[in-house]
Amino acid sequence: MDAPKFLQLKAEEDVLEVLHASMAPNLLKFSLMVTWLLLPFFFLFPLLREGTWGVWLLILWVLSGLIILGRAYLKWSHTVLVITDRRVVDHDQKGFFDRVVTEARYDQIDEVSYQVKGVASTLFRYGTLRVQLNGSAADIEVHHIKKPAKISDKINDLRSEVHGKKR
């Protein structure tokens, strides 16, 4: 499996999983953004009849829709949890120029837990994954991740392998 372009891998490190947030909790938000983008085309002829200001309004409306939708897609596509054979990397894209990257080697992980709360989460099988780290390091918390039980088990298995090698 290939690593995302924005993630730097260590020498001889293999990517096992690249996990995005589930689209289910964001469907309403994305559908509203697409509606905002498509809505000016329903008013195309009335706006063009108004002359120059109508054309500018149409252009600004479409551009704002593209920017809003592009920002949301960039934020979703660049917010990932990457599981490698050596570490877990949480890459949170907060905006165009704002990102938070948290990484933890398996020997730094104290506990892995998950929570599936609510009807929608249960139906669409997504939840919150929490990775608690040793000491004062910032914990990793990933929301709306698909099949959190499976991911939790995978991280725990990798932790066991690392602890087994050290003994």
Image: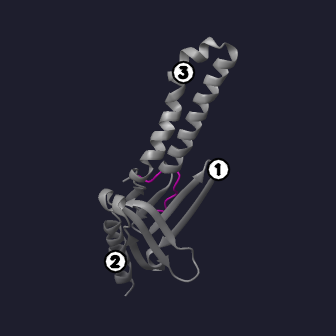
Which residue is denoted by mark 2 in the rendering? 161
Q: Is residue 93 left or right of residue 146?
A: right
Residue at (56% x, 34% y) in the render: 66
Q: Amino acid at mark 3?
A: Phe
Q: Nearer the viewer, residue 151 or 11?
A: 151
Residue lying at 35% horizontally and 75% vertically, measured from the top left? 156
Question: What residue is disc 1 on?
Answer: 97
User: What residue range appears in magenta?
Assistant: 2-12
For the residue pair 72 and 93, the one nearer the viewer reads as: 72
Query: Does residue 12 appear in this view?
Result: no
User: Which quadrant of the rendered structure holds the N terminus?
Assistant: bottom left
Depth check, mark 1 against mark 3: the one in front is 3
**What whole-number distance in Å separates the C-alpha atoms at marks 2 and 3?**
61 Å
Residue drawn at (48%, 34%) of the image: 35
Residue 78, image x and y in percent? 51, 51
User: Mark 2 is on which residue type?
Assistant: Glu
